[in-house]
Image (cartoon, rainbow, N blue to C red):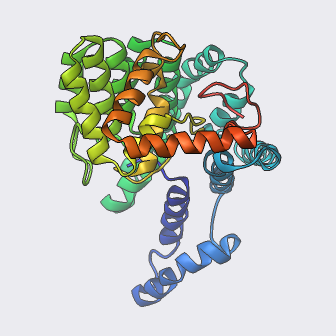
Amino acid sequence: MAFDPQREDYQRLGLRFARTLDGGDATAAAHAFSSFGLRFQQDRDSLPQTDEDRAFHLVTLAAADIDYRLPFADEREAEKLVAHGHQLLKEALALDADCFDAARMQAASEKPSFDGYLAYLVEGEPEVRARCLAERDRALEGPDSPERARLAADLACAPYLRWLAAEAEEALICGRNREALRVCREALELDPHDQADVRFTEALALAKLEDEAGLDAACARRQPHGRRTPADDAWTRLARLALAYKAHEMDRARDELRGLVETYPNAAESLIRQAELPDGVFARLCVLPYSEDELILALSEGTVLLQEGRDPRGAGALSAWVARETSRLAPRASSAVMRERMAESAAGADGWQGPDANLPRGGRP
C-alpha cells in the first residue's frame, strides 16, 4: 500500500491523457491509449502535461536517487546522488512553487535538527491540508466519471497524506508520542485504507506509551490490506514484543520474536544485525509485504524501541535481548553474522553509513 512515486507519476499522466481522448471516436481512443505506456517510458515529452506534472516527475527522479539508490551507494556516488537529488527538487519548485512533496523533501535536508524539521511540518500542515482537500473536492465534483474522479481525488490528497506521515514519524523520533498518535489518527480518518502506512508509526508510538489496550484497539480498526492481516506485520509484532519485554513477560516476548522469524525470510540475520537505514524522504520506502526488506525497514524504524535503556555493554537493552535470543533460536544465522562482521572489520569497513557517518537514523542528506 505504500506510495510508489513512479506509479503515481504514471497515474497522473494517464488520467490527463485519457481526458484528452474524450468525445472522440471510441475505437481511435482505445488505439491511442494502447500506446500510452510505451510513450510514457520512451517519449514522455510527447504526452500532454502541465508544469505541475513535470514538477512531480522531477520529484519521482529525486526520490529514486535519495530514497532508493543512496542507501546502497559508496561515498563518492552518494555525494553525486545527493547533489543531483537536490537539484531536481530545486527545478521542481521552479516549475511549481506549490509542489508540496518537493518543498517537504527539500526542507528535510535544510533543517538543522529533527525538532526544526518537525516544526516546519507542523507550521505548514494547515496550508497543505486546505489546498489538497480543496483540490480533492473539485475532483469529486467535476465532470469525470466516478472512477476517474476517485483517482483524481486520491492523487490530489496524496501529498497531504505524505505530509502527515512525515509529521507523525518526526514526532515519534522527537519523543512526542502523543502528537505522533494524533497525526496518525488524522491521516487514518482521512484515508482508512492507509496508503501512507501510518498504522506502523502508530504501533511504535503506542508501544512507546506502553499502551497495549490502545494497540489492540488500533489493530481492530484496521482495514484489510490485500494479503496482510491486521496485526502480523513487523512493526506491530515489534511493538508487542517491546510491550511484553517492558512488562517482564519474557515468554510472550519470545513468542513475538518467533513470529517474526517464522513470518519473514532471513529474519534471524536481520534481527541480529538490526541495520539502520536513512528514512525515506518522499515517503516510507515501498517494499513487498512480508519481505526481508520490510523487516529491515521495520527494525530500522523500531530503533526508537530497540535503543531504549542500556545493557552493560552500552547497547539498547531490548536491542541486545533481541539479538541474543535470536542467536539462540538460530545459531547458524548468528555464526553467519559474526563472520560477516569479522570480514568487515578486517577490511576496515563498518557497512554503509551514508555520505556523513555522523548522521543518526533519520538524518537526511
- Identify which residue is drawn at 64% across, 24% down: 360
Question: For this rendering, which residue is in front, 103 or 271?
Answer: 271
Residue 82's image quarter?
top right
In this picture, is 58 found above or below 197?
Answer: below
Tell me where residue 357 appears, x and y as whole percent: 74, 30
Q: Residue at x 63, y 48 (%)?
A: 63
**Residue 359 visible here:** yes
Residue 120: image location, x then y, percent: 62, 20
5 shown above or below 31: above
Judged left or right of residue 139, residue 254 is: left
Viewer-side residue, 136 vs 309: 309
Is residue 97 something one can see in this rendering?
A: no
Q: Where is 265 relative to 338, above or below?
A: below
Q: Is residue 180 above or below residue 25?
A: above
> Which residue: 62% across, 18% down?
114
Q: Position of residue 352 (x, y in %)?
A: 68, 41
Counting from the top left corner in percent of width and height, residue 24 is at 46, 82
Query: Residue sitting at 42 percent across and 20 percent down?
Result: 305
319 to the left or right of 346: left
Q: Quadrant of residue 259?
A: top left
